[in-house]
Amino acid sequence: MTTRKTNIAVLAVFALVFALLLAGNCLSPLTADDFLFCFSRFHWSRITGVDEIFPSLAALRQNTNGRVFAHFFVQLFLLEGKAVFNVVNALMGTLLLYILYRYIRRGERTRDLLLLLFVCAAVFVLLPAFGQVFLWLTGSCNYSWTIVVTLGFLYPFFARYWERGERRWLPLCLLYLPLAFVAGAWSENGSLAMLCAAFCFLVLSALREKRLPRFLTLSFLVACAGFLFLMLSPSELGGRRGEVAESTLTKAAGRVWALLAARLPPMLLAALALTALLLLAVLIWLLLRRRRLGCRLCSALVLLALAAGLVVLGHGAASIADFVSSLAVSLLIAFSLWLLLMLRGLEKGLDARTLLSALALGLAALASVLVFLFAVYFPARSACPFILYTTLADALLLGALWDKGGKGELRAAAALFCALALLILPLAAKDVLSVHRQSAARDAALRELAQTPGSSALVEPITPASKYPAVWPGDEDYFNNDIALYYGLAEYAVTEYVNH
């Protein structure tokens, strides 16, 4: 493929992503927290000016969470109107893709185009709660924008380690340092993943150069200060006390252990644990001493675990849409793919810089999930940093394999995920359109009902079939009062929750 044709193809991918995101945003209604943030958290009346956002954010930091930067944009767009947000959010989604492309491109056009297609398709297929992350107003500002901000901050650390000449950006340091603080304070798990990756790249650069990069070290410390600003807010401190004992992941681990302990004799359970440790030790020895055999054996075990997991999860899924939208399925595939590509890279003897970069991004992804050991619940949308960071690591590994002559891996990965994306796209479009029609009909009925003072509304729930709409089942259970206030109704309820 000629350079000119490849450039046109790359631009066409960006244009297509923007068009699809714009269409999806235009078809997505306000939902859940959107109605809540239409009102000031300070005086609980409708926000009518930008000056009213700041006291609302101060109250939010006291009572809800410390994500004041994300929620500033939420309340700003709810004030300015959904139409403005639709365009800006589509641009932000396209900017996210461009930032990822900056990380992975090397100047070989066919390779870069295939990597771009792989990243687009993998994110579309694997990202849990896709609509909540890219189409929901509140969710976009809190999740997809997190990745834009954090990967934007992280890029100079990555570029320094890869010797891409980031020094030319130093005159922009007066803009970069405030970005560092904002990136650190944007999201609990997204900012933590960023800090983990930045620390790894900073240490790797320091080891190579025999000194700490001063400006990047300062930027890292500023980002840490932003993270402390987020996590030490009164609401975060108050809400995190005692959550470890009640957390979703902790309780799940406790249930698994209790189930095993109840069904297996203690001696057998101990023997299985010892066998697993010995197997792990053997695999590590093989990786160190007989790398090719160790990598192939580990890859076989990962594939076996992946297949078994997908069979179990598929058996419990009610439909294909339910299986595709499963958080567990997405995490299992994303983590397994990262492990398989890391092992393939070790087997093929990829350069240490690529392997260590992919490892740093993978560890950052794991940190973004493990932090939920300290949380009461783990919503699917919070897996966004995990999917994006592992996908970026996968792309770096696939690109390096291509450079080393293994072009089949990248072609196969791009073809597989593009085929899955094309199969899923009609389902996603149909579901987004269905939710749009349901929401539009409800909105018209509620606005007509609101013409009569003191009216009450009892409505049917909106029923998405997959992860792609901005609305998800159960979101209206918690925001009835806010929806009533938004439309000027005396009372608002959903039949499903009234009946139960």
Image (spheres, grey):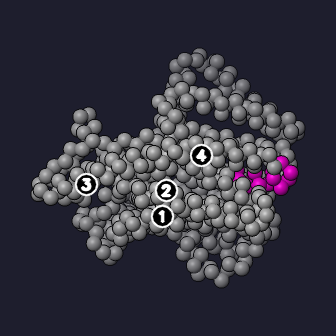
Is 395 contained in the magenta span?
yes
Q: Which mark is residue 444?
A: 3
The residue at the point 54 percent across, 17 percent down is: 263
Q: Are marks 4 and 1 in contact (CB under 8 Å)?
A: no
Tell me the residue that label 1 is attached to: 89
Front residue of 440/493: it is 440
* Residue that protrudes farthest toward the right in the picture: 290
Compute the Cα span from label 4 to label 3: 33 Å
Q: Which residues are magenta?
A: 393-406
Compute the Cα span from label 2 to label 3: 25 Å
Q: Quadrant of the N terminus?
A: bottom right
Tell me the residue that label 4 is attached to: 422
Front residue of 148/121: it is 121
- Counting residues from the N terminus, which is met first, the one under dot 4 or under dot 3? 4
Tell me the residue that label 2 is attached to: 134
- Counting residues from the N terminus, which is met first, the one under dot 2 or under dot 4? 2
Q: Are marks 1 and 2 in contact (CB under 8 Å)?
A: yes
- Counting residues from the N terminus, which is met first, the one under dot 3 or under dot 1? 1
Front residue of 214/305: it is 305
- Res 472 quadrant in image: top left
Compute the Cα span from label 4 to label 1: 23 Å
Is 107 contained in the magenta span?
no
Front residue of 112/5: it is 5
Identity of the amino acid at label 2? Answer: Phe
Determine whether the residue tagged by mark 1 lies in a helix, strand or loop.
helix
